[in-house]
Amino acid sequence: MDGMSVVIVGGGAGLGLLLAQMAIENGASAIGIIDLDPISAEAALAPARAEGVKLAFAACDIRTSDAAQTAFGQISKALGRVDTVINSAAIYPRKSMLDITDADWDASNAVNIKGTFHMCVAAIKQFRAQETEGVVKGRIVNITSVDAFKAHPQNAHYAATKAAVVSLTKSFAQEVAPDNILVNSVAPAGMATETARTSGFLSELSAASPLGRGGEPREMAEWVMMAGGPKNTYMTGENIIVSGGYIYA
Ligand SMILES: NC(=O)c1ccc[n+]([C@@H]2O[C@H](COP(=O)([O-])OP(=O)(O)OC[C@H]3O[C@@H](n4cnc5c(N)ncnc54)[C@H](O)[C@@H]3O)[C@@H](O)[C@H]2O)c1
């Protein structure tokens, strides 16, 4: 990611924050974080600023278009340009299927599907407006989940949103292929972020893994780096499943 400008939505914690740190390790020169709460990311990334990496942070609830577009505009203005956008923000509250309420549906749909949609739109407008460097005009990577493909107790509403994001990824990829913008998604299996640890499903998923263990966030993040980095010049509309053999697509 040498010299690239990378925006991470949901970069305030967990996989998103790790992705910011890995983008910097991989040579990114500018990082933008959009999150409900970017405060701890600001502290965690401070050493990179001291080393000359341009950093920008926006506190934003991505559920509504106006807020999402405004935050993206602030970040892209501060960074100067944007080469890659990673959508990692999501919620995954667990609930038995028959107890899922309208409010539960609305909450998951609004963040996981609609928020991701708003950020894809913002990214594409930015990519189209800026000068292209190289063949690819911009890359988007959406984080989905193995749950889009395999049922897992207590998360029917979450699983449906992630299947929707796999679908959105394909629709966006087709729409912007003529612009040379690449849109892909990565579907991790359970991984030990703080939120996942407290949700309590990790031991069950590692027991179900043919490799006999859950994946580490870094093992998932490598594939996001690949899809969003300069080595990806031709893959678009794909969903990369990183499940440790939990599912075979
Ligand atoms: N952890 C897992 O086991 C696992 C497995 C498969 C897929 N995933 C996916 O990976 C991604 C990251 O998961 P994680 O475990 O790092 O989660 P996390 O809770 O650690 O991080 C998610 C971030 O999104 C932000 N966010 C939530 N709602 C938001 C909103 N309305 N507006 C703006 N920001 C908002 C949160 O503040 C948080 O910083 C998610 O898309 C998740 O669905 C996680």
Image (cartoon, rainbow, N blue to C red):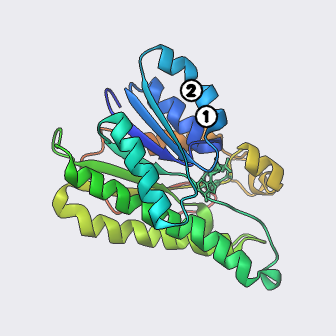
Tell me which residue sits at (51%, 69%) in the image.
114
Q: Secondary structure at mark 2?
A: helix
The answer to the question of whether label 2 and label 1 lie on touching residues, with beta carbons closer than 8 A, is yes
Give the amino acid at mark 1.
Ala
Q: Is mark 1 within 8 Å of ligand 1?
A: yes
Q: Residues within 10 Å of mark 2 (few under 14, many from 20)?
A: some
Tell me the distance, in whole angstroms, between the alpha carbons under discs 2 and 1.
6 Å
Q: Would you name the residue on which mark 1 appears?
A: 41
Tell me which residue sits at (38%, 24%) in the image.
27
Quarter of the image that includes the N terminus: top left
| Residue 113 horizontal/vertical position (percent) | 53, 69
Name above or below for residue 182 compared with residue 175.
above
Which is more toward the observer, 226 or 214?
A: 226
User: In this orientation, does residue 134 appear?
Assistant: yes
Tell me which residue sits at (47%, 58%) in the image.
68
As drawn, the label of residue 45 is: 2
